[in-house]
Image (cartoon, grey):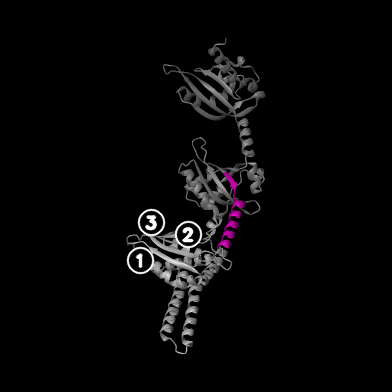
Amino acid sequence: MVKAADWSRGNLQTIIDVIPALLSYFDAGHVCRFANDYHRFWYGRPPQELVGLHMRDFLGHEGYAQRAAHLERVAKGEEVAFDARVPYLNGTVRDASIRYVPRMTESGDYDGFYVLVFDTAILQHRFHSVFDGTALAFWELDLSIGMKLREEGRSVREVIRATRIVDLNVKATTLFGLNRGQVLGASIADRWPVVSEATFEAAVKALEDGAPSFETETILRRSDGTLLDVLVNCAFPQTGGVRTTMVLGMVDLTERNAREAALSQLQNEVAHASRIATLGELAASIAHEVNQPLGAIVNNGNAAMRWLSRPEPALGEVRHSIELLVSEAKRASDIIRRTRALATKGTTDRAYVEPAVLIEEAAALVSRQVASLGANLRIHVARNLPSIKADRVQIQQVLVNLMINAAQAMEGQDRPAEIRASATATPEGVAFAVEDNGAGIPPERLDQLFNAFYTTKAAGMGIGLSVSKTIVEAHGGTICAGFGSDGGARFVFIIPSPKDD
């Protein structure tokens, strides 16, 4: 059985040896006491031959002297990180990222330090593998000169001209139509148009304020002069305690914005078509609503003519018919005025009215037409109903529509046609109901009844219920359709109780 401690020691050594970096330990006198197996790849010698050598033997006199400041800091217990050149096989050198980590005794005394060395070329290769393989376009910019100009109060354009492209990935060269070799070290001024200077200044301001990143949408220029809409995310990495580098990640939004513009244009066209349709609906609404009083005007005019045609004209009846004719003409005028106000969101004539008066006057207006269609109209109004604040003509218009619709729906049915109109109190306000004993409404049509131009009548226009719904909702109420107690249609609308003025 392998002990846990033995397993840990053995596996730890294996892990250390396969790390793709130089890992070693030097004592306080800068003598190597441990080196992992990666030294074999770097120096061409097994680690055992390196143990016991002084750091000077690894770096040479000049390289060792250059490490003096770092060695002093680690001896004070500081962890040190820096970049430097390190001797490699066959007398060559490699750029490396180096870290010194101090080892302190339990008493707090300095005992030596661990050394971790990464080959920068390998790191850069791996970075560029990701950098170039991503679907995002990346630029790395050097703002060191530009920031100095900014401190001097120079213009944004001058700062942009002084900002250089340090690196860019394959996606960026494709997106902007660039040759990587030709733009490295070049100014970004050609890519950054005047229209986007405010965006650049905002990004630099974010860098100065210590923000980790900055994101916005802006416009940049391709090599052929065409403009690109891009989403830009700017990151500000810190190098040696100084932040003069900006890494831009960019997503091309040009096609998306073009689609959105096309969609916006389509929406404008649809809105225009909707306004045209609304005008048509308004015209149809007025024609539908005015048709009832016009019919009454014709009937009363004919009645007056008949009374006048008698051998002895009945002037009293003629006067009464003319009074009714004038009343219906006024109602037609009021309907046109109020329907127009409703369509244009204009103000309507609202006042406190008694529900009983509304329903009784509406019944009186339609009584003759309902009777001519073979229906009997009965009304019921609950006692002590509260007043409501409403446009009298409009609410009567709704009641008249519902009553006439009920009578027309039952025309010609076998059993006696009955219409019951009522007004009752509810917690929300006053509920007006119109119910008949006809064939009812097919369930699949309930959801469509209040749509403009939807009708179940052969000669109907499909406007009355749509206008009724608009009127009720303009009063803050609701309207719905369902089935009555006798299986017929039942329409109920509620006008809310008035709020305190």
Residue type at tag 1: Glu
Amino acid residing under circle 3: Glu
Q: Quadrant of residue 331?
A: bottom left
Q: Secondary structure at mark 1?
A: loop
Q: Residues within 10 Å of mark 1 (few under 14, many from 20)?
A: some
Q: Residue at x 58, y 62 (%)?
A: 269
Circle 1 is placed at which residue position? 354
Residue 189 in view in this figure: no
User: Residue drawn 43% across and 16% down?
Assistant: 106
- The earlier-in-sequence mark between 2 and 3 is 3
Which range of residues does the magenta coloring cover?
249-271
Main secondary structure found in the magenta portion: helix
Q: Nearer the viewer, mark 2 or mark 3?
A: 2
Q: Are marks 2 and 3 in contact (CB under 8 Å)?
A: no
Q: Nearer the viewer, mark 1 or mark 3?
A: 1
Does the stretch in magenta take in 265? yes
